[in-house]
Image: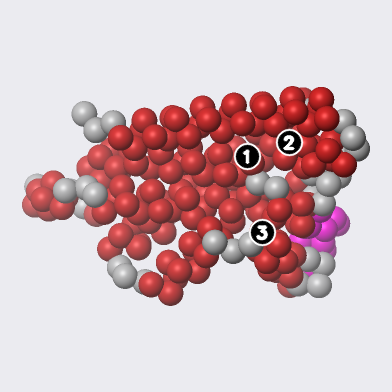
Amino acid sequence: MIEAVILSLEVASLATMLSTGLALGLGVMLAHRRLMILEAVLLTPLVLPPTVLGYFLLVMLGRNSSLGEAWQAVFGSPLVFSRIGIVLAAVVTSLPLVLQSTRAAIEGVDTTLIQAARTLGAGPWSTFFRVTLPLASRGIAAGVVLGFARALGDFGVTLMVGGNLSGETRTASLAIFDAFLGDRPAEALQLSMMMAGLAIVLVSIATLLARRPHV
């Protein structure tokens, strides 16, 4: 159980770091440009059934895909049914939550402050890092926490892309499923309570970050 929980934390941490980097770049772009098709595609994982999303990822990352073949040729192992595969799956499922909060936080920054910084001679990058990002930091942080929680608890997409390999891709959510099928109710309950507690803590932190005004 501990091994599964540690793996879940590792995968969620890596996925959240990647999602945050992508969300910052995409959030800035979407906050200033109305790219409805791109935005719809990026947010679609929020509403797609896990089986559909997992199938699409299997097609994109599998051995018969260009990306899967290139990965196999370079590293000698498949991209799916591996830790890298479940990290990528977690990125896809967590990115929409981080992106939504990031875009909203950036859009919520007072434009007069940005214009004032530009008037005083600050360039676009300097304005972003010294004005926009600090003012939007709490909203972005709330999205990061929610994205981490989503990546931590993913089940369906992780199962399809990573399988349920003990010690390799069996995260805490999959370990609960495995314990249930193996008629180990005490183990399933213990892991479920642990994951539920983590989820409550993470959602509470995200709520506090989103509500507390920036000082």
Front in this rendered view, residue 73 or 163 = 163
Q: CA distance from mark 3 to mark 2?
A: 17 Å
Secondary structure under the numbered disc 2 in the rendered image:
helix
User: Mark 3 vs mark 1: which is more N-terminal?
Assistant: 3
- What residue is pinned by disc 3? 50
The three-letter amino acid code for the residue at tag 1 is Leu
Helix, strand or loop at label 3? It is helix
Mark linked to residue 172:
2
**Amino acid bearing label 2:** Ala
The local secondary structure at tag 1 comes to helix
Residue 25 in the image, given as x and y percentages of width and height: 41, 56
Q: Is residue 161 above or below residue 194?
A: below
Q: From mark 3 to mark 1, how far is it between C-alphas?
A: 15 Å
What residue is shown at x 87% (from left), y 31% (from top)? Answer: 184
Residue identifier under label 1: 152
Earlier along the polypeptide chain: callout 1 or callout 2?
1
Please tell me how crowded label 2 is: few (under 14), some (14-19), or many (20+) other residues with Cα within 10 Å. many
Q: Is residue 85 visible?
A: no
Q: Amino acid at mark 3?
A: Pro
Q: Determine crowd level at label 3: few under 14, some 14-19, many 20+ residues with C-alpha closer than 10 A.
A: some
